[in-house]
């Protein structure tokens, strides 16, 4: 499937379907889920990163279980907004996953999402480093997805 612009993705979603937010890292992928009203993103899980062929069944299971109508993948732009090697890799990965799942997808800027989540977990939740490591990726995915939801609300 084609990677749509953010508003096109929202407009093409079937009624009563959710969005899967993905924050792909080098070792694991943070996963978040929107509600069907497309108002609120919630952290869902973290998946170990592996070869795409091995990961697709996990994504298919999540998509069936949660009635997913599209995916939003975090785009790690450089701090100056440029499209570097990490952004190209994320774009290729998102396009491949979109094709394999048969779902529309778009990319969303996720610069500093992990930093913002870590700062919140330290300052507001007083969470230990070990506990932060367990939740930061799925919370970063939710942070990124919430940004998309807020920006595309009519």
Image (cartoon, rainbow, N blue to C red):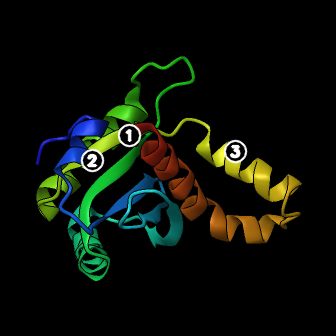
User: Disc 1 marks which residue?
Assistant: 152
Q: Judge left or right: residue 14 versus residue 135.
A: left
Q: Residue at x 87, y 53 (%)?
A: 123
Q: Residue at x 39, y 33 (%)?
A: 87
Q: CA distance from mark 2 to mark 3?
A: 25 Å
What percent of the width, then of the height, locates residue 50?
35, 66
Dot 3 falls on a residue whose secondary structure is helix
Q: CA distance from mark 2 to mark 1?
A: 7 Å
Q: Residue at x 69, y 51 (%)?
A: 117
141 relative to 150, above or below: below
Dot 1 falls on a residue whose secondary structure is helix
What percent of the width, then of the height, locates residue 128?
84, 67
Mark nearer the N terminus (3 vs 1) = 3
The reply to whether residue 73 is in sight is yes
User: Disc 3 marks which residue?
Assistant: 116
What percent of the width, then of the height, locates residue 3?
20, 40
Which numbered mark, 3 or 1, is in the foreground of this view?
Answer: 1
Q: Residue at x 13, y 42 (%)?
A: 2
In the foreground, 146 or 27 = 146
79 relative to 28, above or below: above
User: Disc 2 marks which residue?
Assistant: 10
The reply to whether residue 25 is in sight is no
Mark 3 neighbour density, 10 Å: few (under 14) some (14–19) many (20 or more):
some
84 relative to 46, above or below: above
Mark nearer the N terminus (2 vs 1) = 2
Dot 2 falls on a residue whose secondary structure is helix
In the foreground, 140 or 66 = 66
What percent of the width, then of the height, locates residue 124?
85, 57
Q: Judge left or right: residue 147 versus residue 67.
A: right
Q: Marks 1 and 2: in contact by CB < 8 Å?
A: yes
């Amino acid at each position: 499937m084609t990677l749509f612009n953010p508003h096109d993705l929202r407009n093409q979603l079937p009624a009563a379907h959710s969005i899967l937010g993905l924050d792909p890292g080098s070792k694991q992928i943070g996963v978040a889920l929107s509600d069907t009203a497309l108002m609120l993103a919630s952290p869902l899980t973290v998946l170990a990163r592996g070869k795409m062929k091995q990961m697709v069944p996990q994504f298919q299971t999540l998509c069936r279980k949660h009635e997913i109508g599209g995916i939003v993948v975090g785009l790690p732009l450089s701090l100056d907004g440029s499209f570097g090697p990490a952004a190209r890799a994320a774009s290729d990965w998102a396009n491949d996953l979109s094709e394999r799942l048969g779902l529309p997808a778009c990319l969303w800027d996720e610069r500093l999402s992990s930093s913002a989540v870590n700062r919140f977990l330290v300052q507001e939740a007083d969470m230990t480093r070990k506990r932060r490591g367990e939740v930061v990726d799925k919370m970063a995915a939710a942070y990124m997805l919430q940004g998309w939801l807020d920006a595309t609300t009519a």
